[in-house]
Amino acid sequence: MSNLIKIDEENRRFKLDSGDTSYLIMVNDQDMLYHAYFGRKLPDGDYSYLIDTPPHSSIEAIDDRNGFWISDNAMRLEYPVFGRADKKETALEIKFPDGSNVITLAYKSYKVHEGTVGIKGLPAAYANEKSEAETLELVVADDSVSIEVHLFYTVWRDLSVICRHAEIVNNGKNSVVLKRALSAVLDLPERDYIMTTNCGAWASERRIERHELFSGVQGLYSKRGNSSHIHNPFVVLQRKTADENQGDVYGAVLAYSGSYEMLADVDAYGMTRLTMGINHDCFEWVLEAGETFATPEANLVFSHNGLNGMSQEFHKLYRDHMCRGKYKNERRPVLLNTWEGCYFNFNEDTIVNIAKSAADLGIELLVVDDGWFGHRNGDNSSLGDWYPNEEKLPSGVKGLAEKVHAEGLKFGIWFEPEMISRESDLYRAHPEWTLCAKGRPISQGRNQYLLDMSRKDVQDYLYDCIAKTINDGVDYIKWDYNRNFAEVGSQLLPPEKQGEVSHRFILGLYSLLERLNKDFPDVLFESCSGGGGRFDAGMLYYMPQTWASDDTDAIKRLEIQYGTSIVYPLSCMSAHISVCPNHQTGRTVSYKTRQDVAYTGSFGFELDPTKMSEEERNLSKATIQEYISYGDMFVNGTYYRIANPKDDGYAAWMFLSTDESEARVTYATIDHSIEGPVPRLRIPGLLPEATYVDEERGRTYTGAYLMYAGILADIPGDRGTVVYKLKRK
Ligand code: DGJ
């Protein structure tokens, strides 16, 4: 019998203990699934009193079944529905054949599954061993309209995470239309939170914003077809007194790569409803008789150890239970990407020279970026024509891969599979494969159209192109995606199913990626979307790393990488050393600073090594060796944010080794002046009683001193970064 999920059958109560948290669900007198609690772990006991709907007027009321008026608008619900008295944001809206949208979900039954259950066709966190997790399945239904909803809650032995998704089943004889089918709702009893979200743009992703919750609806969304540069699909609600290392924090992430919504709705009773799922403006789904619709997974974390505590739970979840394949817990090969070094101007000789030079530095993987295929010499042609450009690569991908391998390097290549250039053989052959509304004008973005990924023939074509290229000797693929959706439609689907295309596009993408993962388990895939426009937990299921941003300026990266670290493990975030002046900002930053900032992620270079000075070559050799020596700490160690570059005016962070015997603290100045406030760095995560040695500086500390009194930051020699390597004695 289950020991993470405790069930009181008689009273219809469910207590989910996940890591250091408890999540309580009860069935109320109206047979609704009532959300009683999510927070710090509670002992077992009688929690029936937590059915504590606030008093409300008869204006709200819909039912006097129990002798007094009650309203679902005032209740905390697990999966609220549209069409009744609940006038807040809801999870489910269905249009029935008679034109009505009224549905009432009543509790029916439960089931407990060992481990995780997965979601057909969608990414979902998985248990490595069944004993790591348990999943509760609750069934609610409206028999009058033959609709059943299955709500899944995965709880973890060692993680303070609840993974949720819903499956909607049409048991009727006619099709119904899903207008909205969200993944999860979290009804919190209070509104006293700071909402932390992120905003961004191309080359400026995931910058953190904070505001106090206000009455009404606030939140994030994407209608762009990807999770987007603009807002990443995560929301944090933290108590006003919480900070990086203490206090109550809720984090919610949607593991989905398409258009989404994450909204907080603060109501008249001072309660906060957090909703998350596929963006309902971009969604309509015809659910045929007998069919089931599965939502993406939502991942909820509660931490009473502040933002760092929350981030560390997400990092463990995504690194150990979302990423797959042989690289998930391994240091990724140090790579060199040709984009900023060559852009479209290269040929086989250029690449072979770069390979020789890179091999001499100790680089392990050479990646040929955009421009190797079709007639591609700029961004205006050839997407879809995934065969080598013979003028540039006379011996093809195969010949080039052999030459790069001969230098002792792995070989990687760039693709942008979901796109089609108007100027391409593929478009000439298959204009009907373009994502569009039939007969209407189609907008171009970066001179390209989108392919209709909902089509199996498109998926098969891409699979064949990519598989053939991999078989030519490819060890790594950078999977790019460089424009947003505009006119969405499929020429294959009937009119009534056109509302399904946005989601079907993502299902098609996932299906293709699943097939490639299965057939090529040794290939390392890296996701990219004009930099970090699709940096989400969904993509991490198929590709264990993502290019964080097209901005490679180390100072600009401080804020981008800070924001990324709120949710995503650092090993999943690629970060490269590029040349100065930087191509995006024109800024010059010392080599050491560029190195220390790039170490924070999966490390590499974005330049032409044949153009490096002798001094930079020597520095790079040492850098690569040092990075490799820290491999396990950077991938599997614990990451702590110490300072927020935006609010504090400087950045500082720490990696702690898995056995906690070594810590590496990096302090980065942003606007360094000779005189002025110098930060005092208080180092979290150490053992107060232990002794730590900084051999480089000949200093010995007690953990408590480092944690509570802190150290005055050293003035960086290059006005950039300072690194403290602490060893526990
Ligand atoms: C956008 C990516 O983010 C860049 O790194 C590069 O691959 C270009 N696309 C190539 O077109």
Image (cartoon, rainbow, N blue to C red):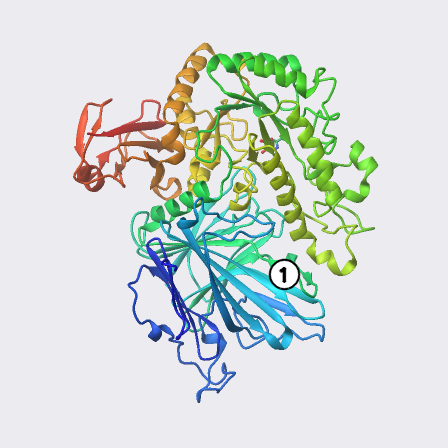
Q: Position of residue 408 (x, y in %)?
A: 53, 15
Q: Position of residue 199 (x, y in %)?
A: 50, 47
Residue type at tag 1: Thr
- Quarter of the render that holds ligand 1: top right
Residue located 78% across and 32% down the image = 424
Front residue of 104 and 16: 16
Residue 347 sits in which quadrant?
A: top right
Residue located 38% across and 30% down the image = 632
Inspect this view and state whether residue 353 appears. yes
Tally of marks: 1
The secondary element bearing badge 1 is classed as strand
Q: Where is residue 457 in the image (x, y as percent from the top left)?
A: 75, 42
292 displayed left or right of 548: right
529 displayed left or right of 423: left
The residue pinned by badge 1 equals: 292
Residue located 40% across and 50% down the image = 131
Query: Which image quarter holds the C terminus?
Result: top left
* 95, above or below 336, in the image: below
Inspect this view and state whether residue 564 appears. no
Residue 356 sits in which quadrant?
A: top right
